Amino acid sequence: MHRLRWLIALSGVSMLVLLALGGYCLNQAHALQTRLDHGYVGEQARRALTPALERGDGERRLRPLVDVLMQRPDLALYALAVYDAEGVLLTRAGLLEHLRLPLVPTAIQERVRAGWYALLGSVGRLRLFGEDRRLLGSVEYSLDPGDVDGVRVEAVSALRFAGWIALGLVVPVGLMFSLAVRRLRRTPPPWTVRADPHRRGAASWGAADPGEFRDRAGEVMDALGYGLVVTDRDGRVRYLNTTAERLSGWSRADAAGHMHYSVVHLDDAGSEASTAMMEKALEQGRQQSVSGALLRQRHGSGTPVEAIAYPVRNRQGVLDGVTLLFRDLTPYRRELESLRREVRLSQAVVDHLDEGLLTTDLAGVVRSANARAERMFGYSRDELVGFTIAKLMPVPFLNVPTIRITDYVTGRGNGKLPKVVGWRKDATTFPVELWVQPMRAEGSEGLVVIVRDISERLRGENLATRLGRLLDAANEEVYIFDAQTLRFLEVNRGARRNLGYGAEALARMTPLDISEELADDSLRTFLSRLHSGERDHLVYRCRHRRQDGSSYPVEVRLNYSREEEPPVFMAIATDISERLSAEEKLNQLAHFDALTGLPNRVMLYDRLEQALLAAQRGPRMLGVFFLDLDRFKAINDEHGHEVGDQVLCAVADRLRSLVRPSDTVARLSGDEFVVLTPGLRSAEDAEFLAQKVLERFAQPLDLPGLSINCRPSIGITLYPLDESDADGLLRHADHAMYQAKQAGRGCFRLYTLHIDPQRLRQLELERGLHAAVALNQFQLQLLPVLDGEGAARALLGRMRWQHPHYGWIEQTEILQAAGRAGLVADIELWMICEACERLREVAAADLPLLPQVLPLSGWQLRDREFLGHLSGLLQRYAVPASALVLALTPDGHVEAEDRHAGLDELIAGGLRFGLRDFNRMPATLTLPLACVLVGEPLTDQVSTMRDIRKAAGGEVLVVASGVEDEAVLGRCREAGIDGLAGSAVMPAVAGEALGEWLRQARVAPPR
């Protein structure tokens, strides 16, 4: 007991000493490593920043240097700040610089950020001095101690290793301490005290009760997992413990008195192992054992076991029986198989590596090799075992005997080592790269040699070198820039020559720094399209700015390389100055007159086509003026062709000065000119312009040394009064010009063409309709719909237009003109707006709201913008949607099949629809009907009305519109039509007078 207490005390003290020693070593290793890291980082920062501070560089030049230091992995920096000699911050970078706390003062944010940097790493400060010992500034930084790759000292590693060893020894010592304490505190069971032979008053082992002893021994063996079988000298079973009962399948009572080979039946490779083992123990009186035998249970199943037979002697030394111990090997075999499986898996992983893996002793003799090494060198695994590294890789190990394989151990810092060449079995060679690490296993030291075939890589590097030389020699500009920062990584010699920048300056720039006419968002859009895979490449044009401030146009082809890590963009820019100049010259020659600089015939036709399209969409006219110079041939004959050319140039300049910038002056051929003047309001405008030209040309042309009178004859035609194409308009203007020649020259004539009065009316209505919409010149009239008792059921909306020349224009003609002018949507929206305004006035006067039936085109219901306007009008005027009934034609209902989803919301709010302008009821309707408007041809047929009611539904209001005489009125009543509207029923009511009419009218209650 005293010895146990001394052991506890010694192990406790040892554990504390080892714990203190390990902590001290690790702490000292960490402190030493931190000092070394600070020294290395400070030296790197001093080298990089001192020249810049001596030059007095500002933040713009210091920031790239700070970014480079932050990105260096060997420095492991969290933050870096540079101050001048007065302590003023010049620039700063760090992991947390982008974090901003809203509503928190800047000073507090700086202190919080500095605290985080202090928690993340080790903070240091360094003062920077110049060569004259003048203080230049200071640097503050935060680094990750221990992660600085530039500092690796074996003393630190040894000190850290000693600390971990000391801490590792704490575990077994602590375990010994715990077991000793547990043993000291554990109370032994009573039977162990009684069985102690040294206990005072205890009986001898021979005097102890054999049954009690076997029971206690059986319990001990049960706890250890052993089966215990005791036999007498004849081999009959006396005792089995619980484990033996479980493994053999025999109970203690059943086995008592049976022969041992009946109860414990062991098979070992087909022989009776238990019989031989038990008999040998009885005969020879020595211990017998067997491993890997199979124990046959009573019911036939087997269990693998290992067994030991001990001969038992009495107090006189006479052999008294045999004690058999056996243990179940199933868990151990399962664990062994698991270990074998892991070994096979590890070998498969090693064989699957792309690199060859060799294990050797310190002399370089191969012990094992993986499958890749077999394929690499051409030898089998058995052949490789015993080879030396020098035989497999003669260069340099055979050529330079002083070079050993251990020189290539990683981290030894032996300087630049020779390149290694491998030698295959077929005598071919290949370049390799070695990684060597020391290995200690099974009590012996060795090496792990990783061999990588770098043939493909060298070919790629050689190809890249050759391509680099080709790119440098190319005239195109080649830029490779980072996909994240957009900074240039590589720039070829052609780009540096064209831009005038050096490689170092370009390394701090991005494509935006050298590009004009290229916005940041445009470049980001290009890059995102390439990054997403939407396009393989993109081509755009911009201007590149040289260092001296000049610029030149380029065409850039942009590509994205995902294979590189990190990914990069590549841009190839071509100077297109000469190409653009040539294109401009070709364009000038192709579209402009070489003498006067005016548009030629090709350009004239193009502009005339565009002017025709614009005139078709607008209310104004297009004037085409054809000019021919009078007696120009006499000027050529008298003064020569050179003076004639000067006259043509002067005429061109004078014509340009007389017209607007939107007009076109072109030279057709010889002395013929054409002027296009869009936007004329009438023929009087064209005559005024022609007279202005003639008055201006009444003055002589001032030429060097000459004053020449030259007047033109002018022919004019106007579109759309002259509904011809481009050729027809020029031909008609030419015809009018000849009429002016025949009238005495120096005058103008307007091309006259007989136009049908109805066609002229249509043209004038189309032109005037735009102004009527803009000036709100329409009037809304409401035609009451009365039932058979004279009560008002609804109002039919229709519009009129007071034209200054043709008087009142009715709705049908207005809608026809609007269809030709493309103003149907504007007209229908005006009617809805006007109806909503009248409904608001009626609601404000607390008068009944009669539904207003308004015509509508079905395609409008597919337009999201129109539905938005309709919903906005209902909300603005606070009008219920049920107060409007939009009447569509059958074709309109078909067009509404593809209606916008927003229409369903309006229908749910009460918007209703009608049917108009049909000869017979359509078979299918896509919208719910609230009103059907029938014309005069359908009103006199009772059966037709019955069919309409059946198709439309009983709740639909059937209205006969256009009832103009008493005869039609009578037929409608006989047909049983619900509502009647027309001059024979009641005249229309002006929208402004709707409230007054409702106060006097009788309104039917709503159904």
Image (cartoon, rainbow, N blue to C red):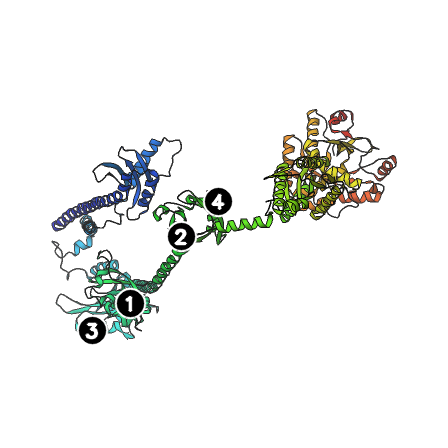
Residue 430 location, x and y as percent? 31, 67
Q: CA distance from mark 3 to mark 4?
A: 97 Å
Residue labelled with disc 2: 494
Query: Where is residue 418 drawn, in percent x and y?
Result: 25, 62
Q: Earlier along the polypeptide chain: callout 1 or callout 2?
A: 1
| Label annotation for residue 522 | 4
Q: Amino acid at mark 3?
A: Lys
Residue identified by numbered label 3: 280
Q: Nearer the viewer, mark 1 or mark 3?
A: 1
Q: CA distance from mark 3 to mark 2?
A: 98 Å
Q: Counting residues from the N terminus, which is met first, the one under dot 4 or under dot 2?
A: 2
Closer to the N terminus: mark 3 or mark 2? Answer: 3
Question: Marks 3 and 1: in contact by CB < 8 Å?
Answer: no
Give the number of the mark in front: 1 or 4: 4
What secondary structure is marked by label 4? Answer: helix
Q: Secondary structure at mark 1?
A: strand
The amino acid pointed to by label 1 is: Gly
Q: Is label 1 or label 2 in front?
A: 2
